[in-house]
Structures are given as structure tokens and as C-alpha cells.
Amino acid sequence: LSSLKLYILLITFFTIKIEIFCSRNIFMCYNKTSNSKKKNRTSGQQQEMSNDKDAELARLRTQNEKLQEQLSELLEQREQWCRAAEVLSGINVDSHNNRTFDDRYKLQKCLKIATLFLRDGNPQRAENYVNRAAFLLGVCNDDPALVLQHKSCYARVVDHKCKFLEAALRYYEVSNFSAKGRELDPATVLLDGSEVGKLKESALRDAVTCAVLANAGPQR
């Protein structure tokens, strides 16, 4: 059943991709052939036609983005972390055709992609999205679950770079995390599928491990 659902999603996804491509070409051809008739149209008619074209392309892109999210979820369930991350990273979260993604949505997507790449053992690609998420946290830091997820991802990236002393400090920070005096429910599930309580316990163990691996010195 899962394989069938994945197959159907892939067909639908590529069908919409083709629709977007064809729509662009049709609109381009139409614009070229109708240039000679523009003088006979009012500015209002021209604007209405342009709005209709933009609305249709925006509708197709919206459908495509929703399919990408569903496809990424299915690939994640099949433990194809890298493919799931690549599909999700294909969503253009920048503004286009009158559609704007809010900062929270962008932050969630950056962190989700980062967690998928980390689960795939690819910290280099994850680091890019962790850094983008850090920028977004500056304007969207009211969600403690997202803040904790970012701290966890950053600690893992530093750990993979063998900066063990810094990683130990970051892991320890995760294990003691509290947002403005508020404690997250230990049963809260984060974007990477881990529960807050278990994540903190794991972070404390990782902090000890990294401290042992760090170079000897006063900071250690």
C-alpha cells in the first residue's frame, strides 16, 4: 500500500511539473502572438489577462509544493532520508507569484531538511539549512520546540566536524534547555521524531562522550 501510494504521488508530482512547464510555454507563445493585438485592448483587459495567468501558475505551484511535502513524508517513512530531504528542499520558499511563505514555515522546512540530512549521515548538507534556520530564529523565536530542534541540530553538526569541546557544550545546553523559564512537555515530539525528554537524556550522554574525546585542557 505504501509503495502504491508513493507511485501515485510520483506520477501526480511529475504531471503537475509538466503542467507548469506547458503553461509557461503556452503563456509565452500567447504573449508573442498577441503582441500585434495589444493596441486594441484596454489596459484593464491586459491586466486581467496577466492576473489570470499568474493565478493559474500559482495554483499549479501550490499543488506541486503540497505533493512534494507528501512525497517527502513517504520517503521518510521508508527511511530514504537523503531523497526525502532533497524533495523537500525543492520547494522554493522565497516569494513568487503573489505567494509568500511566512518565517515560521521557512524555519520549519529548514530544520526538517537539516534533520533528514543528519539522519542520512550528511552533516555538510545539513549545516547549510541549520545556518539558514539560525537567521530565521532571529525573527521567529517564540516556539521553544523549534528553538530546541535547532540547538540539537547545531550540536550534531559541530560533533560531526570533530569539534568535541564545543559539541559537548552545545549538547549540555540542549540537555538543560528551558525557554524563558518554561519547560517543554517531555512527551512533545520534535520535527526529527524524537521526544523532548529522550532528546535531553541523549544530549547529556553525548555531552559526556564529546567531553571525553576533547583535547585535554582547562576548558575540558
Image: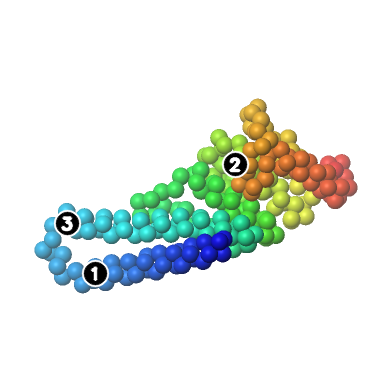
User: Residue 14's mark?
Assistant: none
First reached walking from the N terminus: tag 3 or tag 2: 3
CB contact under 8 Å: marks 3 and 1: no
Location of residue 48 in the rendering, given as x and y in whole percent from the top left corner? 21, 55
SS at badge 1: helix
Query: In the rendered view, does 50 fall on the left or right side of 89?
Result: left
CA gap between label 3 and label 1 equals: 15 Å
CB contact under 8 Å: marks 3 and 2: no
What residue is pinned by disc 3?
Answer: 45
What residue is pinned by disc 2?
Answer: 146
Query: In the rendered view, does 99 fall on the left or right side of 145?
Result: left
Residue at point 87% right, 47% down? 212
Colour scheme in the image? Answer: rainbow
Given the image, on which type of amino acid does mark 2 rest? Leu
Query: Which quarter of the rendered picture does the N terminus lie within?
Result: bottom right
Given the image, on which type of amino acid does mark 3 rest? Gln
What residue is pinned by disc 1?
Answer: 30
